[in-house]
């Protein structure tokens, strides 16, 4: 119905709302009848932006974003970087790269080739049914670590678990 609207937030609350136009509807009634319905856009003072691509493309787009928002509040940024293999130093590298830019990176995600976010072969398994090692191993597989690297990571993870269990 034309006079019914969802009452959302005027402030973007998620990166899924980066393209949403925020505003209010002004409804004018004459008695019980709707006479007019007008949208009034609200200014957005802080933008949520999502930047995607390989690392070079992401850095180039971050510089462009800085230039575009240099005279406003810092943009809040989500970065999705396409990588060939996991890069443990990526967070630090991107935060260092943007240290003097007019933005705050709030979220960094990576996309690896052939990355499966759901392990369809094993089906749904409750987290409490898995050991910490099994959870760690599945996460390594999800992020695309090669099996030869996963073995070393799993050994290091076991050492960490042993150390934690000794101090507990």
Image: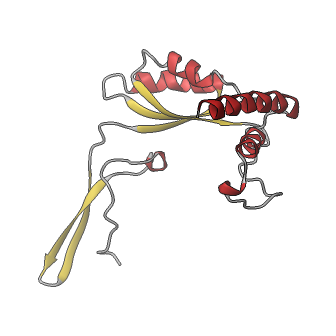
| Residue at position x 25%, y 58% in the image | 24
User: In the image, is 87 to the left or to the right of 113?
Assistant: left
The answer to which quarter of the image holds residue 67 is top left
| Total labels drawn | 0
Residue 25 spot, x, y in % from top left:
25, 63
| Residue at position x 72%, y 52% in the image | 130
Please tell me which residue lies in front, 157 or 166. Answer: 166
Q: By what rule are the colours in the image chosen?
A: secondary structure
| Residue at position x 44%, y 50% in the image | 17
Residue 113 spot, x, y in % from top left:
78, 38
Answer yes or no: is residue 81 visible.
no
Looking at the picture, does residue 92 appear above or below residue 160? above
Please tell me which residue lies in front, 94 or 56. Answer: 94
Residue 62 spot, x, y in % from top left:
51, 25
Residue positioned most to the right: 148
Looking at the picture, does residue 19 appear above or below residue 54? below
The answer to which quarter of the image holds residue 90 is top right
Image quarter where the N terminus lies is bottom left
Please tell me which residue lies in front, 118 or 113. Answer: 118
| Residue at position x 56%, y 20% in the image | 92
Residue positioned most to the bottom: 32
The answer to which quarter of the image holds residue 132 is top right
Image quarter where the C terminus lies is top right
Answer yes or no: is residue 45 visible.
yes
Residue 86 spot, x, y in % from top left:
72, 29
User: In the image, is 105 to the left or to the right of 25?
Assistant: right
User: In the image, is 111 to the left or to the right of 102?
Assistant: right
């Amino acid at each position: 119905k034309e006079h019914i609207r969802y009452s959302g937030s005027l402030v973007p609350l998620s990166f899924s709302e980066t393209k949403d136009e925020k505003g209010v509807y002004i409804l004018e009634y004459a008695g019980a009848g709707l006479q007019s319905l007008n949208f009034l856009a609200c200014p957005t003072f802080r933008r949520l932006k999502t930047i995607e691509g390989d690392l070079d493309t992401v850095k180039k787009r971050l510089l462009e974003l800085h230039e575009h928002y240099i005279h406003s509040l810092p943009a809040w940024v989500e970065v999705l970087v396409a990588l060939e293999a996991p890069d443990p130093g990526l967070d630090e590298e991107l935060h260092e790269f943007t240290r003097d830019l007019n933005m705050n990176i709030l979220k960094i995600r990576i996309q690896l080739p052939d990355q499966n976010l759901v392990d369809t072969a094993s089906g749904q398994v409750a987290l409490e049914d898995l050991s910490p090692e099994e959870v760690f191993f599945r996460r390594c597989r999800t992020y695309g670590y090669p099996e030869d690297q996963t073995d070393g990571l799993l050994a290091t993870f076991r050492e960490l678990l042993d150390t934690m269990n000794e101090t507990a």
